[in-house]
Image (tube, helix red, strand yellow):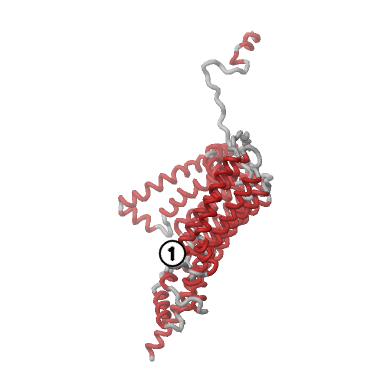
Amino acid sequence: MDNINQNIPWQSGEVRPGYVEVVPKPAFPTGKGELIFGVLTLAFSLLLCNSLLFAGADLGFGVGLIGTMLCACGYLRGRGYRPDRYAGALLGLCLVIAGSFVRSSDGGLKFWMVCVLLAVPSLALCLTAGKNRRCPDGFLSLLDSPRTLFGLGFGRLGQSARGIREAFGAAGALGKKGGAVVLGLLIAVPLLAVMIPLLMFADAAFEGLVELLPDFQGDEILTTALLGIPLGWVLYTRTTALHHVPREEKAPKARKGLNHLTVNTVLTAVALLYVVYLISQLAYFLGGFSGILPEGYTRAQYARRGFFEMAWLCAINLSVIALSVGLVSARGRAPRSTRIICLFLGLVTLFLVAAASAKMFLYIGANGLTRLRVLTEVFMLWLALTTVFVCVWLFRPKLPYMKPVLLTGLALCAGLMWADVDTQVARYNVRAYQEGRLETVDLRHLAGLNAGAVPYIEELTRDSDPEIAQTARDILENYDLPDRDLRGWNYTWARARDILEEYRLKEAAEAQREGST
């Protein structure tokens, strides 16, 4: 009988015909470290979302950003991962940028910095855990960032949730009850977020009851939970997945490159076009270096035309260089002739950047600074540095050109945030006017800047020109600076508030003294 049973396929380890083998769903192992990391990440995510939605991207938001990054770094460090110099530099610059939210009141620039802080830390953490698919030296390494954030963060949410559920189950009866309560709360939050506003709208008595509750803002709490919990879950999953998901090795695909003669022909045609173009436009481009404005141009037209030409041509040049080297190097290293022509295109790019920058400085010297002019100059600086790194890489292929490109970009972003662009614009324009380098100062433009311009507008209230002084006083008297709680505090706003309060008290005292006389 035992022999007969051993010969039955499904009793000897084989799959019984007509049945599908049930494979248990994987779950991320969850221990004490994961639970502590999860609670801290959730707390900072709630602070981050609450501050952003109800107080602005300032102190509370910056603390939330720094907290989530430090928690992720601490978790990976506790699992034995150490960032190399490049990943450490990326994380350090991201922390510097996150800290600058306490300094700056520049809402537009903060939006772009939030985008940067969504992408770059994911790349740095991926490199720290050694789960990158591509070499960090090249441009394609940037693709590891969305893969980490979306592929691991969103794609593994189920596995992290099952791991937490199993951790509660392993804790015995109390853990199971606690897990059931937590699950119920997570389900109840979005349900209450919909029901409470509807009930308040439908019944005045219930609305009055809710409004009587001390310091209770139901919409704020529910909205914070509705957004902060999913964000914390994604950030938790992203980081734990970097530890638990094995590294995926992708087999290199064989690529067929083009013959270098074909690529060189295209490059030569482009290079000859540039030679003819530069000769025909030499006086136009050199005008920026000599400080001479060509006939028929205003300074604004001259600077704007140069910038947009530069931006498009530089983007095309860098794309042509990368594509050409990539197509030829698929058959081996790019021939010297290809690299020389690409170097010429790189030098043309540098010349265009320098010419456009010189024209912009010519415009700034006559009309002062604006936000757009500052950002334009910084972008041109970064573009020039990128072009230099690419030109060196053409003859030193071991140069990890993407690393200095990304690091210099982050460093420039950190500098812009900590300097506060509007503060520097107002300072330059007022100082240039006071020193005689500008004939006048555009107070209407200064009034449209953020709170960083207030100290310099206040200086102009004592200007020798009575019209400018009166206009500055009118601006300060009507300047609207909303009150903020601790979450919305930043240095630029606090400095402007103190100056406005002192100015208005002084004006009130002078008015009272004049009235008494």
Q: Which quarter of the figure has residue 266?
A: top right
The image quadrant where one finds the C terminus is bottom left
Q: Residue at x 56, y 31 (%)?
A: 25
Tell me: 486 left or right of 444.
right
Check the image and report above or below for 59 versus 41.
below
- Residue 209 visible in rendering: yes
- 263 versus 286 height, above or below: above
Q: Is residue 87 left or right of residue 377?
A: right
Image coordinates of residue 345 in percent, x first then y, are: 57, 52
Q: Is residue 480 above or below residue 241?
A: below
Q: Position of residue 438 (x, y in %)?
A: 48, 76
Q: Is residue 30 visible?
A: no
Q: Secondary structure at mark 1?
A: helix
Q: Find residue 516 and report its horizontal and vertical position in percent.
A: 38, 89
Report the residue that reaches farthest toward the bottom.
517
Type of the residue with mark 1 = Gln
447 above or below 434?
above
Residue under the point 43% across and 73% down: 442
262 or 227: nearer the viewer: 262
Between 331 and 45, the residue placed more toward the observer is: 331
Residue identifier under label 1: 301
Q: Tell me the residue at 49%/77% (across/down).
A: 433
- In which quadrant is the N terminus drawn? top right
Q: Quadrant of residue 99?
A: bottom right
Q: Residues within 10 Å of mark 1 (few under 14, many from 20)?
A: few
